Image: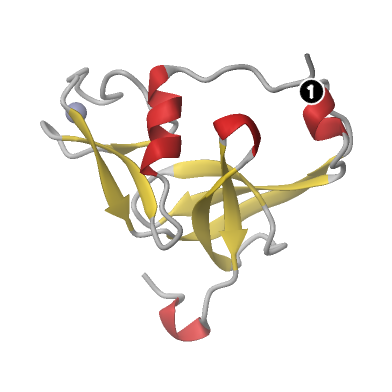
């Protein structure tokens, strides 16, 4: 079957927490670390007391690239994919679909959008200059 690999429980929880108007990520109740990708335990203190929290979804594009080859048949149909590494103001670095075509240094917003098979796709969106500063 030509579908992406199944996700873990934390991956499914990310999809369930996704909202159109905010980026919702895991945060540790013990040390307050925000983390991505979602995991069973905190990457900082190993606590399993994690919750989902809307975070500041503004960030800066670190680098971008175009993906021209994929082993996943589902993604092969949509090549080339514009990808970007984004440093979010909340402290998390994410690899996203660069829908806004941001270049290195550009300020963007990152949104979590529903994708095929119940997956969640992180995408860049344009940001107003007035709200670009952290
Ligand atoms: Zn922690």
Residue located 25% across and 26% down the image: 44
Residue nearest the viewer, comparing 9 with 48: 9
Residue 69's quadrant in the figure? top right
Q: How is the image coloured?
A: secondary structure
Residue 11, position as x, y percentages in the image: 45, 27
Q: Residue furthest bottom?
A: 130
Residue 65: x, y in percent?
A: 77, 47
- Toward which corner of the image does residue 103 lie, by quadrant? bottom right
In the depicted structure, whether residue 30 falls above or below residue 34: above
Identify the residue at the far top of this view.
Answer: 1
Q: Is mark 1 within 8 Å of ligand 1?
A: no
Q: Is residue 60 left or right of residue 42?
A: right
Which residue is disc 1 drawn over? 72
Look at the picture and state if 23 lies above or below 102.
above
**Residue found at the very far left of the displayed protein:** 30
Q: Position of residue 87 (x, y in %)?
A: 48, 51
- Element on which disc 1 rests: loop
Which quadrant, please, contains the C terminus?
bottom left
Question: Does 88 sit left or right of 27 as displayed?
Answer: right
Q: Is residue 68 left or right of residue 2?
A: right
Q: How many numbered marks, from 0 up?
A: 1
Q: Quadrant of ligand 1?
A: top left
> In percent of the image, x 88 and y 37: which residue is there?
77
- Quarter of the picture containing the N terminus is top right
Pick the front one: 11 or 39: 11
Q: Residue at x 71, y 51 (%)?
A: 64
């Amino acid at each position: 079957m030509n579908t992406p690999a199944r996700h873990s429980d934390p991956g499914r929880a990310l999809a369930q927490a996704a909202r159109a108007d905010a980026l919702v990520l895991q945060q540790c109740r013990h040390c307050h670390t925000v983390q991505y990708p979602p995991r069973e335990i905190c990457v900082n203190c190993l606590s399993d007391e994690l919750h989902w929290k809307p975070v500041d979804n503004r960030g800066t594009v670190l680098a971008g690239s175009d993906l021209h080859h994929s082993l996943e048949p589902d993604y092969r149909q949509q090549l080339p994919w514009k990808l970007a590494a984004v440093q979010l103001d909340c402290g998390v670095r994410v690899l996203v679909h660069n829908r806004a075509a941001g270049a290195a240094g550009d300020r963007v917003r990152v949104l979590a959008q529903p994708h095929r098979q119940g997956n969640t796709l992180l995408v860049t969106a344009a940001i107003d200059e007035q709200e670009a500063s952290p």
